[in-house]
Amino acid sequence: MSQPDAFNQAPSSAERDPRWARESLRLRRRYAKDKRFRFYTVLALLIAFAFLAVFLIDLVRRGAPALRQAEILTEIAYTPDTLEKPLNAFPEDTRDLVSDTVRWAVRSEVGWAEVTARVHFTEQVKEDPSNAIVDMKLTTDDLPFLFDGLTIPREHMLQLIDPSELGRLQQELISDPSLMGKNERVILRGSPALQQFLTDSTGLDEAVVEGAGRLDESDLAGMRFNAEKFGEGKSVEQWVLAHHDVDQYLKGYKYMKPESYPDPELAPITPEMAKRIDRLYDEGKIRLAFNHYFFTNGDSKTPETAGMWPAIVGSVMVLGIVLLLCLPIGVLTSIYLEEFAPDNIVTQTIEVNINNLAAIPSILFGVLGLVAFVTFGEWMGWGNLRTTAIVGGATLALMTLPVIIISTRAALRAVPDSIRRAGHAMGATRWQVVVHHVLPASISGIMTGSIIGLAQAMGETAPLIIVGLVAFVPEAPTGPVDPTTVMPAQIFSWWGMPQRAFQERAALAILVLLAVVFILNAIALVIRARSEKSW
Amino acid sequence: MTTTSDPSSPQIISDADTDAAQSSSEGFSQFASQVIERPRPDGVATDATPTVTFRDFSVFYGDFEAVKSVNAGVANREVTAIIGPSGCGKSTLLNAINRMTDLIPGCHTKGQCIYDGDDVYGPQTDVVWLRRRIGMVFQKPNPFPKSIYDNVAYGPRLHAGTSGSELDQIVENALRGAALWDEVKDRLHTNAMGMSGGQQQRLCIARALSIEPDLVLFDEPTSALDPQSTARIEDLIAELRGKYTIAIVTHNMQQAARISDYTMFMYEGELVEFSRTAELFTTPEHERTQRYVTGRFG
């Protein structure tokens, strides 16, 4: 309501003429009420925007630090000594500041595991090389204190041997038939699992651990220095990822400062470490560099190497599956219900149920997905489909289908009947009227509704929790039956991690997710605006 | 129902003639002066079978009888107008000819509606084929939301699969037939919705003509248009007469008088009178007709 301001003053003629006195007072009050009401609406808008602004600002504040990551310039010594004590690869002043991942990487670079196994060349070896490995008997010669001896079954031995060695043995037998029948102990390259076991005692199944441990004790298994690559020993200087505690300290978080702890000496960053870090920073040996790992890596146990790339790929893949399932089924169902279904009790029941489906809490779809796809899939012999993109996609498709059906019906209804009648009068069959005239005219409405439904599906977490997509997924999926996760699930699992460095990554992931959803909605807006039709 | 006079040239019936024919002293129909008598089209015999024959034809919406037992016909290659007050069933009757009433749930018929020798509502009738042979133009212009070219080309493409230069020729002929070619020949591929109402209606006529129908049905084609567009379309219909059989529903009595050869007057679902336009407007048989055409009601 825009009246010239003169009107907002009660007209002076009203004040002069006593007949209008009562009404002019009321008129003034009415204008005042108007003004107040307008003010309230603007206030409401401002409050809503304030919430949005606070949310976004807080998110950016939390997530922006994750764009950078602490790196440290250090010498790494690859020597036989490193094999024994991997920590010694680093000089004293950087040893406790580098990321655990760097230490592990050094360990696997500096050498490899070796294991002595008993090999028996038989005819069967030519078909399947694993037949060459036979049970390994340890005697008191190997281990003086082993009174009863120990036999390690070949199945366990096979877990300790690198698979490439089996092929090599097979080739040896084929090229040198004189080996046939030989039964002796051979030193073979160890498997990655053995290597991990030898370095940090993990990586092997419990059953195998005893045997591997005995082999280690008796020096029949051990790490060997990679002399080919490092000769006598080599030392390199390079930038490596710093430990996430260092990263958090450098970014200035209060919780990482030693002073925040009741006993600073027991803090993750002690005062001495803090001084050292500051010194190295001033010397330029520690820096905050762009965190490219965030966009290239997958989930990781260490926050510094954690990234959301598999989550992004997983989201796109799941969304693609949702699209593939929802659009055809949803649009065709809508067409049938809107154009062809007779108006009887059956059709009405279907309509009521579809509307109800759209209102069901999303987590229930997760249970449905679990039963329908995972359990049914196992029963049908498709293997365990939990955590796969196809199950996530199918579950979300169930959830999005009612939304698409409802919005498509609205789009179809918006097409004026006159167009259908013109089509019929021209001699088009019922399906031709729909396909030639109604569908093309309603495409923009269908697309807008679909994109909005998909944008919603992109942010769903609850149903995917049940179906298992909230799992530790370090690698991006290559196909629909690979284990995968989606962005909101990744955010959810990172937020719950003990290391606080994951919090800032979760915040940044939220920003990425928001950006994607905004883009999808913007596309929907543009499509709708550009194809506004005037009938 | 057959013509009694067969003038070689159109003539306007003068007021003097009408005066003498009045049975009531309540005045005469001012529309009578608008009636134009046209010669029978070439090649149509005097007792030729009408294109459409209604025999005790009724149309029901559920239990409501919207058209009550009509006995009439639409003459070959002449214009038959159906007039009457709102709600008298004239649109229903027209829509029943090409079975557009099938699209209305609960609509059924009794009696016969014979088109081209077959009962339109017989069990053997192919509705799609029927509608292909009968063109329809609606009250509110409803071109498809496509280009002008695609609108006119739709019918030939759909039914004959025509394409290429043959299709171009058909489109041009249809647009010429609808007196629209000169106005749109430079913008054939622009959106049809961008035209004025009158142009859109002529486009709908061109669209209907594109597949060479035998019969064209006009359902109040000019009631949504301005007088100038109305006049152009009336001229167009007069031109089409002789080549196409035309049935037109109108509540504009001037229009009926000017362009039609036969007129049906309907009232509350019943066919009150059906005769040559000249006679209906000058010497109507029934009093109700008389009162309607003199503007007493409706």
Image (cartoon, rainbow, N blue to C red):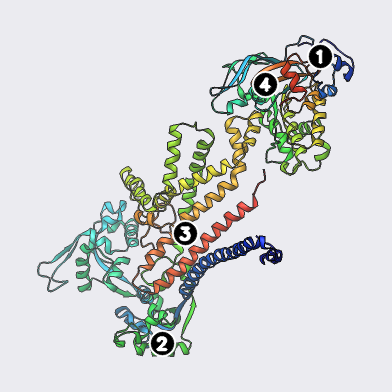
Q: Are marks 2 and 1 on the same chain?
A: no
Residue type for callout 3: Val
Dot 1: within a 10 Å radius of its alpha carbon, few (fewer than 14), some, or many (20 or more) residues? few
Q: Alpha carbon of mark 3 to alpha carbon of mark 4: how far?
A: 71 Å
Q: Nearer the viewer, residue A379 or A319?
A: A319
Q: Which of B127 and B34 is in front in this view?
A: B34
**Residue type of the residue flagged with mark 4:** Tyr
Q: Are marks 2 and 1 in contact (CB under 8 Å)?
A: no
Marks 1 and 4 sit apart, C-alpha to C-alpha, by 34 Å
Q: Mark 3 points at which residue?
A: A313
What is the x, y in percent for residue A81?
32, 82
- Residue at 25% x, 67% y is A116
Q: Do the residues indicated by labels 3 and 4 lie within the same chain of the protein?
A: no
- Residue at the spot of label 2: A277
Are the residues at dot 3 and dot 2 in contact (C-beta closer than 8 Å)? Answer: no
Type of amino acid under label 2: Ile
Q: Residue furthest left?
A: A147
Chain under callout 4: B
Provide the secondary structure element on which disc 1 rests: loop
Residue A18 position in % (x across, y down): 67, 63
In the picture of the structure, the residue carrying the numbered disc 4 is: B267
- Measured Cα–Cα span from mark 2 to mark 1: 109 Å
From where the camera sits, is residue A232 visible? Answer: no
Residue that carries the numbered disc 1 in the rendered image: B43
> Judging from the image, what secondary structure is the residue with disc 4 in?
strand
Count of marks placed on residues: 4
Q: Quadrant of the C terminus of chain A?
A: top right
Mark 3 or 2 closer to N-term?
Answer: 2
Residue A327 lies, with reference to residue A176, above or below; the image says: above
**Secondary structure found at label 3:** helix
The first of marks 1 and 4 along the sequence is 1
Report the disc number at residue B175: none
